Image (spheres, rainbow, N blue to C red):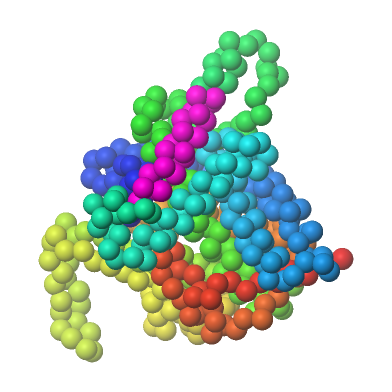
Amino acid sequence: MEVLRPLTGNGLLASRGDVWRSRRRLLSRVYKTQWLQEQYAWLQKAAETLVSAMRPLWGDEVSAAGAEQETLGHLAACTLDQVAGSVVGRSLLAGGADGVGFVKDYMRAVQTLHARVMNPFLLVTPIFKLSSLGREQAKLANSMHQFIDDSVEKMKKLQSEESESCDSEASTGGRLPGSALEALLELTQDRGLLREEIATLLLAGQDTTATAICFALQLLALHPEIQEEAAWDEALQERVVRETLRLFPPSPLLSRELTADVQLPATDDHGPLVLPAGSSAVVCTLFLHRDPAIWDEPHTFRPDRFLPEACKERHPFAYLPFGGGPRSCIGSKYAQMQMRAVLSKVLPAFRVTTTATREDLEDLKMGMVITPKNGFNLRYEPRG
């Protein structure tokens, strides 16, 4: 996560020790169950905007390849709009030129992160800073931070105006109420901290979620009988989300630095092993989630394995798409809500098909997130 630091500073993903603990406590006061539930209506509204943007793409005069590429772009913009609405209270897609400009800069910043991860030389910070990619990312980081600072100032101004107004129906100034920023401003006025955590929340909640949604749609395209049922069944949509994250966790490597010796039990292949304190342990959830000792028919897409009765006896650390323990992802429930919101609007509007195979989907490449080497292959047939 060190590659995020130029964009997020000491935000939750890149910090450690006492800094991490203080930031985690702060954000835990925002990401509560009630706040999450209040966000769902906005997440669905953003998904409705996505569906409206997708419909014209699949007319008779538009090539499938071009429409598919534009659809993926719209999906990325949708997930960013969802997160921005929840985090800073601003809809980027309805926010005029500054919103559109931020979307463009943000998407390019994400591309620079992927490009850096894929080049071992650029993982060396001094080399990266001197590279053309590093210089470009620095400019994009300044643009993102300026947008965040502007959002903070606008929110503070609106809050001040509302506190001075006696009118209970006072205008919200176009902002979406109940944002994380609104809550954070009641807890801290530290401008640097706000900038770092908002940048972290935007980055953590967009790219991984957009990728996971694409995997879900691809799997549903390969299983049309499940897709037809899921189009009208929100409980099944939730199970589709969880099964997708089992098969294709977007960030499949969990790394932890050991603060004490850890003894692993003996197996058929070796005797007891001791992992010494100070070493790093990496868990690959992609393998864990497909372990036949834990999962029946582990490579099969079967959402009903997440029916309540099927989960009762499962070990809590058998399923870790968002990590586990104290450093588990604070936005895990929010990300799953994002995915459900998009599926709840896209599936009733379109029948999703593909010319790809499951083997194509399994041919993965690793960047900031995992994706198919040849990209996603999705077609959308508007329902009547």
Q: Residue at x 22, y 89 (%)?
A: 269
The quadrant holding residue 42 is top right
- Rendered view: 279 above or below 100: below
Which quadrant: the C terminus? bottom right
Determine the residue located farthest toward the bottom in the rendered image.
268
- Magenta range is 134-155
Q: Residue at x 83, y 69 (%)?
A: 60
Answer left or right for 340 relative to 195: right
Determine the residue located farthest toward the right in the rendered image.
384
- Rendered view: 54 above or below 275: above
How many labels were placed on the picture? 0
- Residue sitting nearer the eye, 302 or 197: 197
Residue 131: horizontal and vertical position, in percent? 32, 54
Answer left or right for 330 relative to 215: left
Residue 250: horizontal and vertical position, in percent? 46, 65
Report whether residue 344 is seen: yes
Answer left or right for 339 relative to 234: left
Magenta-colored stretch includes residue 141:
yes
Report whether residue 34 is seen: no
Which quadrant: the N terminus? bottom left
Magenta-colored stretch includes residue 90:
no
Q: Residue at x 50, y 80 (%)?
A: 362
Answer left or right for 147 relative to 39: left
Q: Residue at x 66, y 36 (%)?
A: 96
Residue 205: horizontal and vertical position, in percent? 50, 51
The quadrant holding residue 353 is bottom right
Q: Main secondary structure of the magenta part?
A: helix
- Rendered view: 247 above or below 116: below
- Residue sitting nearer the eye, 345 or 267: 345
Residue 125: horizontal and vertical position, in percent? 26, 53
